[in-house]
Amino acid sequence: MKKRSIIKNITIALTCVSLSLGVSHAGQIDPNTGEGYVKLNRKLHCSLVDGEEVTWMWAGNAYSRVQGQRDKKLFKLLGMNVRQCVGVNDKERGEGYRIISREIMLYLDTETGEVLKTWENPWTGETNEVIHVANDPVNSRPDFARDKEGKENTFPATIADGGYFLPYEVPLFYPNPLGGEYQEHIGGTYHSAEIFDFMGNSDTLLDADTNIEYGKIAWVRISQWLPWMNMKGRDGDMYFNAVGRKLKSWDDMPDTLKDEIKKSYPKYTNAPPANDQRKNETSWTYMKKIIDKRRAESKN
């Protein structure tokens, strides 16, 4: 074998070994370092540039699940989240970031796809006013290069075949804002789960010279009945299933979503300010404000 061919084969072998060991190459973000953990999460969720806004959108369906009954398709779903990332720093945990966002999710007619104003409840026979998701803000806690014990975080995605795959589960169990002060004694605690699966192109994700990776997402929620459905304690649960992506522009959303936001939720064209320290809104806290306001108005 000629000397040049031997050198070429050795180079190829070494390259393969370095890739299998996750060695970072020039121009790439290393997922096995705390610094890489922060950068890759920022690129995936928003941007490496503070204040650069990005928009996620998703579409899917919501179903009922009641023991002894067939599942019912209740609504189509169409949602968006507009956000920005803000860098933070901690003396012990190093560089980090927060996500600052607000989000809308519309409930649509299962046949026509029109935005629902009212909904005929098949269990109660009532006509319910539909309260769409309008959560402002939806901000994350700071996430840092190192965990609370000082260990360096690493990016937990599977990176293979030119792509990345990142599952993320959020079990939820907390006092229901619409419940009383004795939920630990008689029940009523809000019990749900949010399941996110991110995926996309690993080349753009790892590229140190790009600020944003336009990834895709699958989202599943398992939850109790929505508060505006007025189910009065009936047994049953719901599950939501949707897919979506990060958009190149807010204007890339479907017209149904853009038109409804411009008409009814105009502030959702932009993310909240970078210094936003408000408590997060949920469907339950949002509904509580509506109920409390209407009760107060009825007394006047």
Image (tube, rainbow, N blue to C red):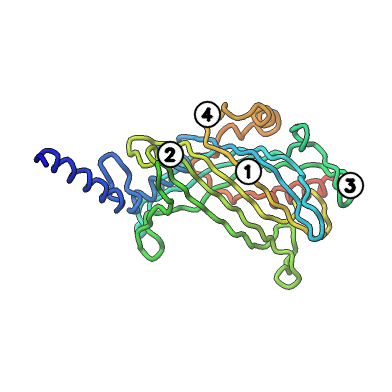
Secondary structure of the residue carrying tag 4 is loop
Question: Sequence-wise, which precedes: disc 1 or disc 4?
Answer: 1
Picture quadrant of residue 73: top right
Q: Is residue 186 left or right of residue 213?
A: right
Find the distance from the CA under tag 1 to the CA under tag 2. Answer: 20 Å
Find the distance from the CA under tag 2 to the CA under tag 4. Answer: 19 Å
As shown in the figure, which amino acid type bears the numbered disc 1?
Answer: Ala
As shown in the figure, which amino acid type bears the numbered disc 2?
Answer: Asn
Residue in front for this viewpoint, 59 or 72: 72
The residue wearing badge 3 is 126
In the image, what residue occupies the spot 28% across and 47% down?
Answer: 24
Residue 185 in the image: x percent, y percent?
73, 73
The residue wearing badge 2 is 201
Whether pointer 1 and pointer 2 mark residues with C-beta atoms closer than 8 Å, the reply is no
Q: Which circle, 1 or 3, is nearer the viewer?
A: 1
The residue wearing badge 1 is 242
Count of numbered circles in the view: 4
As shown in the figure, which amino acid type bears the numbered disc 3?
Answer: Glu
Q: How crowded is mark 4: few (under 14 residues within 10 Å), some or many (20 or more)?
A: few
As shown in the figure, which amino acid type bears the numbered disc 4?
Answer: Ser
Q: Which residue lies furthest to the bottom in this view?
A: 185
Q: Which circle, 2 or 3, is nearer the viewer?
A: 2
Question: Sequence-wise, which precedes: disc 1 or disc 3?
Answer: 3
Find the distance from the CA under tag 1 to the CA under tag 3. Answer: 27 Å
Residue 223 in the image: x percent, y percent?
69, 55
Question: Sequence-wise, which precedes: disc 2 or disc 4?
Answer: 2
Q: Which circle, 1 or 4, is nearer the viewer?
A: 1
Q: Is residue 260 left or right of residue 152?
A: right
Question: In the rendered view, would you say 27 is above or below 283?
Answer: above
The residue wearing badge 4 is 249
Question: Sequence-wise, which precedes: disc 2 or disc 3?
Answer: 3
